[in-house]
Image: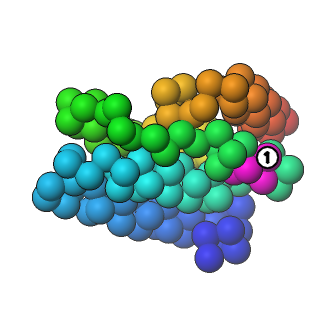
Amino acid sequence: MINAIGYCDIRYVDSLSGLLKYYEALMQRGGLVARAGEVRSLKLGLILDLLKAVGIPEGHKSGLISAVLRGWDMNCRNRSIVQVEEELQAISISINALQNELAAAKSQWGPKARLRLDTAVLVALPLMPTDLKSDEVGTIQDLLRRTMNCLKAKMDG
């Protein structure tokens, strides 16, 4: 649904806001910190949904999504409760940062607002090198860098 929204359509803000509220509610459930595997799955889901939402060329989008899926490390056997709490806090910080960007965008919507939001989404992705298999980190960082350059070129153009 979110991909069908027009590039400069302010409904993008509402759709993205709804997505963030959904994940925020999921992350606030009691006892989640004791279920590291579920936290990892929810984090991956949030990252993938955010990547699907951004208005980047399909080649960049599919490449990033495939690379994240291929590189995602679901192993949580060695994660302590403190690490899971830190992971939940990082996700919360990303969601809050994006909600602030959405509020600002909604009050100042203009022709480049979508590009600024897409850039903010990529910057706020709760994706850390420790989330990934070590052999995939460089590939994903390179894909993100190229995608950011693509958005910057659109912003300057």
Left or right position of 29 against 106: left
Residue at 58% x, 54% y: name it: 48
113 above or below 85?
Answer: below
The crowding category of the residue bearing disc 1, from other C-alpha atoms within 10 Å (few below 14, some 14 to 19, many at least 20), is some
Picture quadrant of residue 23: bottom left
User: What percent of the width, then of the height, locates residue 21?
Assistant: 34, 62
Q: Could you tell me the amino acid type at mark 1?
A: Gly
Front-lying residue, 19 or 77: 77
Left or right position of 20 against 15: left
Left or right position of 56 against 94: right
User: What percent of the width, then of the height, locates residue 77?
Assistant: 36, 38
Q: Quadrant of the C terminus?
A: top right
Residue at 65% x, 58% y: name it: 52
Identify the secondary structure beneath mark 1.
helix
Q: Which residue is mark 1?
A: 63
Front-lying residue, 131 or 52: 131
User: What percent of the width, then of the height, locates residue 134?
Assistant: 62, 25
Q: What span is colored magenta in the figure?
A: 62-66
Picture quadrant of residue 38: bottom left
Left or right position of 137 against 11: right
Residue at 29% x, 62% y: name it: 26
Q: Is residue 145 magenta?
A: no
Q: Quadrant of the N terminus?
A: bottom right
The number of callouts visible is 1
Residue 111 visible? The answer is: no
Q: How is the image coloured?
A: rainbow
> Mostly what secondary structure, the magenta segment?
helix
Residue 136 visible? The answer is: yes
Which residue is the extreme one toward the front?
77
5 above or below 21?
Answer: below
